[in-house]
């Protein structure tokens, strides 16, 4: 049975290994924008990022993050003309290949959306490659809507917006 919980600093190496393994095995490398070392370090600052993991017998098999820092969402807010100081980004969603199609990403997303609601976040933005069918299905499931498709640097992305103001 899969267990879901926040990833702790003690599990940093497991998180890095999970990210590396998933990225090495991705057929379409443009589906995932890799993390910098600084971004990984920030994942363990609860005021900037909330990181959840999916575990199978204590083995980390999936992860997703809710980025709370303004640095993460500034460009997306400008693109969407979103005038709010209460915006987070659901980011870094990945699952080991052998654990896909088991609802893990949906459950991680659900838990991160609850974290956002508990922190009175008004909007969640999500970026996904338009041809990444599994991720697009997952984030559509959350109720988020595609607002634009743009290039973020060299990466083509659907930008989803989830409005939580009705649920706060």
Image: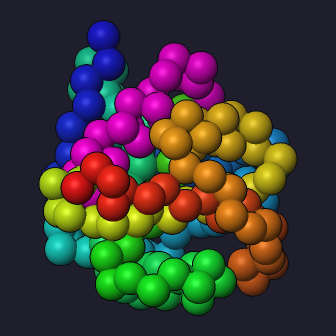
The residue sitting at 75% across, 83% down in the picture is 153
Residue 147 part of the magenta segment:
no
Q: Is residue 34 shown to the viewer in this render?
A: yes
Q: Main secondary structure of the magenta part?
A: helix
Examine the rendered structure and indicate whether residue 101 appears above or below residue 20: above
The residue sitting at 61% across, 40% down in the picture is 140
Say which of 68 and 79 sits in front. 79
How far across and down, in percent of the image, does residue 84 sit? 38, 82
Q: Is residue 112 shown to the viewer in this render?
A: no
Examine the rendered structure and indicate whether residue 35 appears above or below residue 3: below
Magenta segment boundaries in residue numbering = 97-116
- Quarter assignment of residue 98: top right
Which residue is outermost to the front?
Answer: 166
State left or right for residue 152 relative to residue 162: right
Say which of 56 and 66 sits in front. 66
State left or right for residue 6 relative to residue 159: left
- Quarter assignment of residue 58: top left
- Quarter assignment of residue 86: bottom left
How far across and down, in percent of the image, does residue 80 sit? 62, 78
Which residue is outermost to the top?
Answer: 1
How far across and down, in percent of the image, does residue 91 sit? 48, 59
How far across and down, in percent of the image, does residue 53 sit? 32, 40
Residue 112 part of the magenta segment:
yes
Q: Quadrant of the N terminus?
A: top left
The residue sitting at 20% across, 64% down in the picture is 120
Q: Quadrant of the C terminus?
A: bottom left
State left or right for residue 133 relative to residue 38: right
């Amino acid at each position: 049975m899969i267990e879901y919980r926040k990833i702790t600093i003690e599990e940093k190496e497991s998180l890095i290994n999970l990210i590396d393994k998933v990225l090495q095995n991705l057929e379409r490398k443009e589906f995932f924008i890799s993390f910098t070392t600084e971004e990984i370090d920030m994942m363990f600052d609860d005021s900037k990022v909330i990181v959840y993991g999916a575990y199978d017998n204590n083995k980390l098999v999936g992860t997703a993050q809710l980025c709370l820092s303004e640095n993460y969402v500034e460009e997306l807010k400008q693109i969407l003309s979103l005038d709010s100081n209460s915006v987070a980004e659901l980011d870094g969603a990945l699952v080991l290949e052998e654990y896909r199609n088991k609802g893990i990403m949906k459950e991680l997303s659900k838990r991160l959306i609850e974290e956002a609601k508990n922190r009175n976040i008004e909007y969640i933005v999500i970026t996904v490659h338009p041809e990444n069918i599994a991720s697009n299905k997952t984030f559509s499931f959350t109720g988020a809507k595609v607002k634009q498709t743009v290039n973020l640097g060299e990466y083509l992305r659907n930008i989803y917006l989830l409005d939580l103001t009705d649920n706060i």
